[in-house]
Amino acid sequence: MGNRSHDILKKPDWCFNRSVFKSVGFSDDDLNRPVIGIANSWNELVPGHANLRQVADHVRKGIYRAGGAVAEFGVIGACDGTAQGHAGMHYILPSRDLIANDIEVMVEAHRLDGIVLLGSCDKIVPGMLMAAARLTIPAIFLNGGPMLGGVTFDGRKSDLTTMSEALGMLKSDKIDGETYEQLEELCGPTCGSCAFYGTANTMCCMAEAMGMSLPGAALVPAVYADRLRLAESTGKAIVSLVQRQITADKVITYQSLENAIRVLMATGGSTNAVLHLSAVAAELGIDAGAMMAAYDRLSRTTPQIAKVNPASQYDMEDFHQAGGIPKVMEEIKQLLHGDSITVTGKTVAENLAAYKYKYPFNPNVISTLEQPFSQQKGLAILRGNLAPGTAVTKPAAIDPAMHVFTGSARVFDCEEAAEAAILNGGITAGDVVVIRYEGPKGGPGMREMYKAMKYVYGMGLAKKTALITDGRFSGTNNGCFVGHISPEAAEGGPLAAVENGDKITIDIPNGSLHLHLSEEEIQARLTRWQRPQPKFTRGYLGVYSKLASSAAKGAVIEI
């Protein structure tokens, strides 16, 4: 099969197109090569993307060395951290679909032969993987690498989210203002995706686990020279994929998604991965119900063999040096589809057999299948009369004593109201904080209840209260929490019927989220319920709030 770019670059009929390329500096030699796109989400606003210009330079080197020509273009990438706790967070999840659409437009409009996807953070990575699944061309993903950990604080290396925990401590007089302000200077010492196992690093690990990144690529820190060598190797690899016509749809399959789910469960990754892997699966036409069933089924037979922040004091650099995703996959290889093809052109089994580790193994970070850290699920799917369409929680980040919790509802109709109540001492032991109308449509955009959980931790309530929502959580959150409740409150789900004082039980071992009311009482309350007016009626959020699917379907835009 020839390069598809050559179909629009042949002489003499397509000399107009050749002149367009030549006007930006392409040569005849370039136009005889496969034209490889680099979708680069570099910007100066997001720490995880600040080094991607340098990474792209090394990808270019690899592409040229392997015989390709490069066409680089920009992609948006917003920071979840900066957007936390205000109206900006409404835009974060919806940006994922924009990213997928924009990459599709650029690839198809210019008939690119292959694409290298450069991104690092929460919605950028899944948006890029969605684009890859949608496009039947060779594609490879490369992230910019995690940040190094900061100064030691509260018993572990700090990270950017430590500031939110410290605010709760400051408000409850556990630390002084000087300590708090000094932490601001020292908790984020380098560029890179945040130093904990949140959504950003989880999704980079999922890309590697499903075979869309080179082995070991997910966790090499941003400031390591190995990150640049990986970039050059990635450039060479994409040209090989084009030459062999190994397209992304041959790599991203139901089997490779199951491999990713196995790694997600084995490592206790972010709950948001459920949302994003479902969105990638939707691009392949895989039924949402099948994906939810897969999470549930695979979680029951995948023990947790890696334990990193927020489940332990070890950060992403520690995870990388302990062997990273190759080591995890090696330990659980009997649970994986070893015959799945990857962007190396080889199978998962072949990659693992050939992988060379550079550092000593650390059993405190990555254990074995025979002696796991926990037989419990890393993530869990809950159902019940409060979540008939499913909800998601993360037992790996919850104290085992809190895996069954019953408390009294304290109901808030937005994130900000809950945060104010927490910081003002309005939440007490035994409460279940209910934050609703923050789902895909109601939010819109399924904001993260990151700050609320961090404030609960800082106030000393993480093991005394729970928080449930139709919104989402950050991968760094811990405590007792349940998110992605479907149907969401704005769609008339049972969450809309909850009132202050209602008893709610979270039962992770039995996969249940239960409101202690009769079905008749729930339905009577919903009969009196009135759908709130949409918060946005114009612009992209107005469109998204109308078309977004439920969290159980990946919160993708449904046409």
Image (cartoon, rainbow, N blue to C red):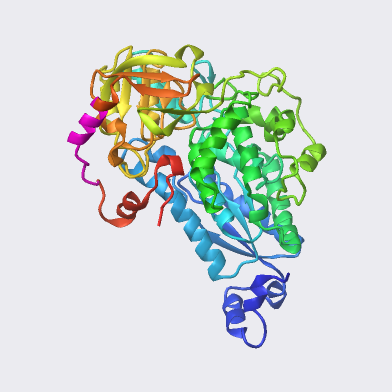
**Magenta-highlighted residues:** 521-534
Residue at image x 32%, y 52%? 546
Q: Is residue 182 visible?
A: no
Rendered position, 28 above or below 428: below
73 part of magenta stretch: no
Q: Classify residue 16 by image quadrant.
A: bottom right
Rendered position, 198 above or below 121: above
Q: Classify residue 112 by image quadrant.
A: bottom right
Q: Nearer the viewer, residue 378 or 158?
A: 378
Quadrant occupied by the C terminus = bottom left
Residue at image x 29%, y 21%? 422
Rendered position, 476 above or below 19: above
The location of residue 228, given as percent across then percent down, is 68, 47
Disc tally is 0
The location of residue 509, given as percent across then percent down, is 50, 19
Apparent side of residue 184 relative to residue 368 in the rendered image (left or right): left
The location of residue 376, given as percent across then percent down, is 57, 20
Task: Find the residue positioned furthest to the bottom.
Answer: 12
Q: Nearer the viewer, residue 447 or 255?
A: 255
Q: Classify residue 216 by image quadrant.
A: top right
Residue at image x 36%, y 38%? 487
Quadrant occupied by the N terminus = bottom right
The location of residue 357, given as percent across then percent down, is 77, 33
Task: Find the residue positioned furthest to the left.
Answer: 528
Q: Is residue 130 visible?
A: yes
Task: Find the residue positioned furthest to the front.
Answer: 520
525 part of magenta stretch: yes
